[in-house]
Amino acid sequence: MFEFTRAPVPVRPDLRYSYVSLWEHLARPGPTLSGFQRISLLDASRSTGAEAATAESGLEPALGLLADSLYHDPIAVDGTMVRTAADAAGDPQTVEVAALVSMLSSVDGTHRALGAELEPLPEPHGGQPTGEIAEGLKRRRTHLPVPPGPIPVMFDLLPYEGAVFQSLFGPQYMTGWEMALDTFQRSPGLNRAQMELVSSRTSIHNECFY
């Protein structure tokens, strides 16, 4: 798993390990979706078929549109699209779909950048959704419920999904501690300024409204 065949450069072990852990997470039931619904949605998102897949899984089509857009055309995602999905399916399901597709997109994007074949999705685990949803969060300028504070922490409405999402920061970007270091240098890899240039350029290209 995650051998990155045909990649022109070696892939760091910590990045591979984080992806293996993520794949296990994707297969398990989430707060509002079963393992089958999660994998079905992600598989369909890769081929712009999530809108149809949501209907087959008993989910709101607006979630499928959000998933397809996040994966293939993030520029199209705006407040109206997010609020439409949340009004139709509820905030928790919308947050779960957004988290899942965001994580899959980052992994698949790494594979495409390296010229590697996409990793097949895992077989879903059985079981019912966990219902682990935080209380007391409110919709803010992010259009989804987040904790108070000047910098929103996305996906914290679903604490475990949020924690897994943030666990990818270190291997794919920087940890919170590393972000505090102006002179951070990954070895081998980019320095802090180079990382910020890439991330800023990506955000501008995707017209990230968060």
Image (spheres, rainbow, N blue to C red):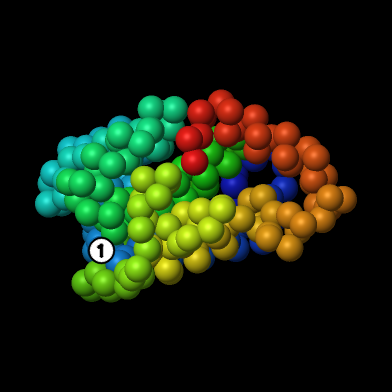
- Residue 30, given in percent of the width and then of the height, sits at 32, 65
**Position above or below: 74 against 16:** above
- Residue 8, given in percent of the width and then of the height, sits at 70, 37
**Residue at x 59%, y 47% (from the top left corner):** 4
Instruction: Tell me which amino acid carries mark 1.
Output: Thr
Task: For residue 136, say whether it is visible.
Answer: yes
Q: Could you tell whether 10 is left or right of 118 in the image?
A: right
Q: Could you tell whether 138 is left or right of 49 in the image?
A: right
Q: Secondary structure at mark 1?
A: loop
The image quarter containing residue 201 is: top right
- Residue 204, given in percent of the width and then of the height, sits at 58, 28
Q: Could you tell whether 182 is left or right of 95 in the image?
A: right
* Closer to the camera in the image, 210 or 15: 210
Circle 1 residue = 32
* Closer to the camera in the image, 149 or 64: 149
**Residue at x 42%, y 68% (from the top left corner):** 159
Task: For residue 185, say whether it is visible.
Answer: no
- Residue 133, given in percent of the width and then of the height, sits at 32, 69
* Closer to the camera in the image, 24 or 202: 202
Dot 1: few (<14), some (14–19), or many (≥20) neighbours within 10 Å?
Answer: many
